[in-house]
Image (tube, coloured by chain):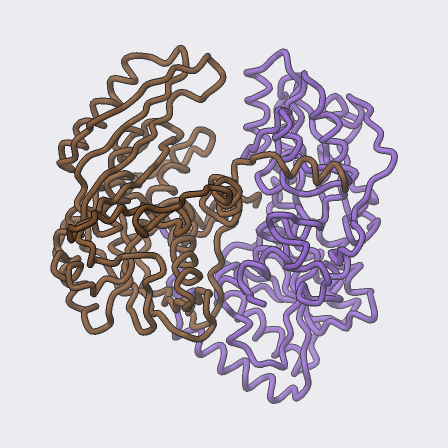
Chain colours: A purple, B brown
Amino acid sequence: MEIPGSKILRSKQFTDKIISSINKNIKAINKPVKIMHVCGTHEHTISKYGLRSLIPKEIEIISGPGCPVCVCPAADIDKAIELGKRDDVIITTFGDMIRVPATNLSLAELKAKGADVRIVYGPNDAAKIAKDNPNKEIIFFAIGFETTVPLTGYEIKSNPPSNFSVICAHKLIPAALELLMSIDQLSIDGFISPGHVSTIIGIKPYKLFSNAYHVPNVITGFEPNDVLLAILMLLKQIKNKKFETLNEYSRVVKPEGNIVAQRIISEVFESVSSPWRGIGRILDGGLAIKDQYEKYDADKKFDIKIEKSTDIHPGCSCHLIMTGKLSPNECKLFRKICTPLNPVGPCMVSMEGTCSIYYKYYSE
Amino acid sequence: MSEKKESSKIIRLAHGAGGVLQEELINFITKDITLKNVNKGIGVEELDDGATIPLENYDKEIVITADGHTVYPLFFPGGNLGTLSICGTVNDLLMMGAKPLALTSTIIIEEGFKFEVLEKIIKSFNEKAKEANIAIIAGDTKIMPSGSLNEIIIATSGIGIKDKEIKIVDNGLKVGDKIIITGTIGDHGTALMASREGLNISTDLESDLNLLLEINESIKSEIKSNYIHAMKDPTRGGIAGALNDWASKSNVSIYLEEEKIPIKKQVNAICDMLGLDPFNIACEGKALLSVDPAQADIVLKKIKSTQIGKEAEIIGEVKAENPKKVLLKTLVGGTRFVDMPLGEPIPRIC
């Protein structure tokens, strides 16, 4: 049981070669370079392997809105919390979702107060709980990007029990990328795009942006040398004034993506304008369940209305951190009031959240 | 935010997971105790593996440990609640440099628990105690109404004896010391997680649950000569928890080298998959040692010659700069901090 290729992709000799090539290229470019990634797992790799301590100071790597837990709006969590207060409801969701603070509470706090909130590893587990508990309503709080959407779609398509339904808070990455590229003051010189989302959607959606906005882009994997190679591939493009989407992760990502998964997505969901926590409403930034499957749509089944919700609590800078305008160290609450034990904003909760990763791997 | 404040006063699972929250809880419970030690021995304030009662007019002192044992599932690959209770108690005594003598056991059982399951647990408990040559000299049982407790809990107190001169304590680390781990890390917690319902991970990985008697026996003379400055079995919180604890109590830093730290391939793969850090995952049959640098190679050789210490390695060094921190040189040569784990490890989403 070893990850294929991990020997080369974690080999120090290979790392040293890439770093020396990165050094040469940044010298040739002769100005600071700002690179943004939009994936929590990339930030995790960068921090876990101490990659920032290896690359030259002229290269700044910032994190964009790459954590599905972080961008889930408080209103959706509030909805799950409202439903979870009912005696006949079991709320199911992914592990790191339950600690995210919403307007007043988190699902973990609701659970500590006695509500039935369960961590599952996928919607199929939730459907099984529904089968085993016919007298309860089982609600799967569905979050995540294109990587987790096909799982939810597949479950909805496979005739789950009628006491199973879904709060659909799924988000789509390309729309968010386009928004980030169009923010002028961000001045990003290159993007690192997420490998697993690309496994599903393929390369095409990115190509449009890199051409239209003149920003080079590299899709890459999650081993340390994957990320360093992506940085090198970006630097070479910047040096040669090229603006292409390249695929470093070709061992997994196929140009056309995963057609079967794409079909499931388009059959069950439709893209809608959707609020992202900390960023705002993004056109085509999220998914809703199509009318054909509305009996599994918790929104329609229970008709819960959240009047007022708070995404960003006073003093919290998550919105600025997710758009790469601030680093966690520059937030006034970071490490003082906001810690992983007492997260004020969503970026401190998930292990993929930028603040939580900074807290764990970088010292004051 | 008032509702938030109110609810944060509840005891949560993470309060028992060996991280910062657990420290908070222990401080909360112990801060108002009046008498905290006997004859200036190690007391509750040191928060060490156990406490000591120095015997007046003798060169020996009594070592006492206390431990509550719960595990889910009760039977896991490589052990069960019974074996876990004995190993945990005996190892805590050993980590103070003591010879285990006896233990007491309190068993709290939920109404409705099956006799045949209890029989299996007690059988393992007694067999393991025999293997460790430790007497079971007192005990108590309580039955709780169905639903007020999950299955069964065993609480033990270990009693051992040691020379007063042997000082193996959490705040004993000295600059220059070498850090030794007696084998692969994270096996117990990962095996447990893989065996839990709902994950469907098929693996031959077993818990490393084991008595550490052999380790202490092999380095008896170094323990007596005080070349071993600290010893700890990194259970809850893993090596990250144990090493941070040492660094902060001893006011030193610990520099680790990732490539030296032994980790099983299966543990790495499962942790990668679940988004967990093996540094934070519990071991149940491993010891960390902080050793006088001049003796480190000999100690390592002796540990390697034991059955359970074959994969022992020197994984790091104690330094003066960056006090109270643990730093890691990563596989690819970068440097990062290794933080105190915060609570119960939760598998991530994708």
Residue B48 position, x and y percent, is 36, 50
Residue occupying the far front of the picture: B57
Residue A206 position, x and y percent, is 70, 60
Residue A61 position, x and y percent, is 63, 70
B244 vs A247, nearest the viewer: B244
In this rendering, position of residue B197 left or right of residue B53:
right
Q: Is residue B16 above or below residue A359?
A: above
In this rendering, position of residue A265 left or right of residue A199:
right
Residue at 44 percent of width and 28 percent of height:
B197
Residue B146 position, x and y percent, is 46, 13
B221 vs B244, nearest the viewer: B221
Residue at 83 percent of width and 70 percent of height:
A184
A234 vs A92, nearest the viewer: A92
Residue occupying the far right of the picture: A307
> Would you identify the image quadrant in which residue B176 lies?
bottom left
Residue at 60 percent of width and 19 percent of height:
A130
Residue at 46 percent of width and 65 percent of height:
B324
Q: Is residue B189 above or below residue A225?
A: above
In this rendering, position of residue A61 left or right of residue A79:
left
> Would you identify the image quadrant in which residue B326 lies?
bottom left
In this rendering, position of residue B213 left or right of residue B207:
left
* Residue B264 visible here: no
Q: Is residue B22 above or below residue B292?
A: above
- State which quarter of the image contains the C terminus of chain A: bottom right
* Residue A89 visible here: yes
Q: What number of labels is visible?
A: 0
